[in-house]
Image: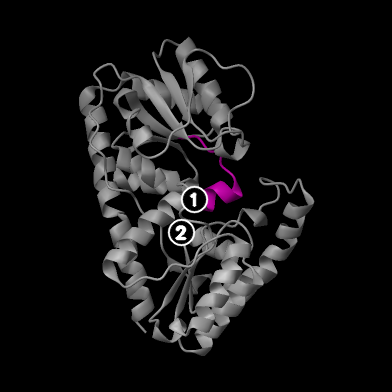
Amino acid sequence: MYPLDGGRWGPTVRIGHLRDELSALVELDVVDGYRGARRRRLVRYAVSGRLRGLDGIYVESSTFLPAEADVAFLGLARALGIPVLTYVRDAYQLFGEEYPAASLRQRVGRAAYRPILTALTAVSTRIAVPTRGLAEAVLRDRSASAVLLPPGSPPPVEVPRAGDAGRLLFVGDARLPAHGADRLIAAVSCARERGAQIGLDLVTRAGQEPPGARPGWLRLHRAEGPAIHALLGDVLATVIPRPRSPYNDLALPIKLFDYLSYGRPLLVTDCREQAALVTAAGAGLVVGDSIEEIATGIEVLARATPGELDRWSAAATRAARAASWRHRAERIVELLVSR
């Protein structure tokens, strides 16, 4: 439900990785695009007769609502006996306190989300979600039937850490309070006032910059993929400073898996799912979500020995390999053909 070849950004990066890995395993047809283009492509695909040659359909839903053409196409596939696995990656529309609907379009989308999701579920053989908590929010009493399919990780990159590395890395929208960049900036300032020699790199898209004045130790970057890798030499650790909330507790940030591939220690707040993953991997520190607690975690990282940093980094790399996109693609194929 995204155009995959219009430039890599956010969701299209991970879906692009998944498409590449699926292509290495099976013969793959891809129908993509936003609603208008996707409608036309689905109609052309349906009338071409190629549906009858399919062994399965994997659907990557977007944060936007599915179109009626999506539901009709998948309903036709089910009528032909083709299994459909639909991946629901988030459900922020169900959490109005954290993600208020400011525009008419957003309000309409919020009101229609549950009915449209019900229709999408009805034409799917199975629903996949990244976490059990999200399954409970989306599917309610049918959550036990959901398939857990956490995000995948890109291949680890090998960028040596500079001996004087002293910067933290945050990638994402720095405007949204739910992402926590504002408290991260305040925490870095607090840690510096207490003597920590630390800086902060924010990688954001245009229009996602933090408001207010920017101190000299904060650097903004427009970067993705290899351009982010070029920053890693000076990076001490990566950070996900999200505040605890009902949604953040059940969400598993996709960028967490990108961070694992960078081979740097992670500093994450104690939102349930991300904290459990980092703790199980032994890939860094879990701290409370207050500015003071984040600042204390930053100070621990700033004082860490090279050996401690190396152990966290090695654990992150191992976790990235275990969560590779290849493993994710293999699981999708397994789910579609094991019927």
User: Is 18 placed above or below 335 here?
Assistant: above
Quadrant of the frame with the N terminus: bottom right
- Disc 2 crowd, CA 10 A, few/some/many (<14, 14-19, 20+): many
Q: Position of residue 46 (x, y in %)?
A: 52, 81
Q: Which residues are magenta?
A: 240-250
Q: Which residue is mark 1?
A: 6
Q: Position of residue 134 (x, y in %)?
A: 53, 59
Mark nearer the N terminus (2 vs 1): 1
Q: Taking the image as drawn, is residue 60 in sight?
A: yes
Q: Secondary structure at mark 2?
A: loop
* Residue 20 circle label: none
The residue drawn where x is 47% and y is 59% is 131
Q: Nearer the viewer, residue 185 or 275?
A: 185
Q: Residue at x 59, y 63 (%)?
A: 37
Is 170 within the magenta?
no
Q: Amino acid at mark 2?
A: Pro
* Label 2 sits on residue: 130
**Tag 1: residue type?**
Gly
- Asked if residue 241 is among those painted magenta in the image, a careful observer would answer yes
Does 198 sit left or right of 334 as displayed? right
Where does the image place residue 64, in percent across and percent down from the top left? Answer: 62, 58
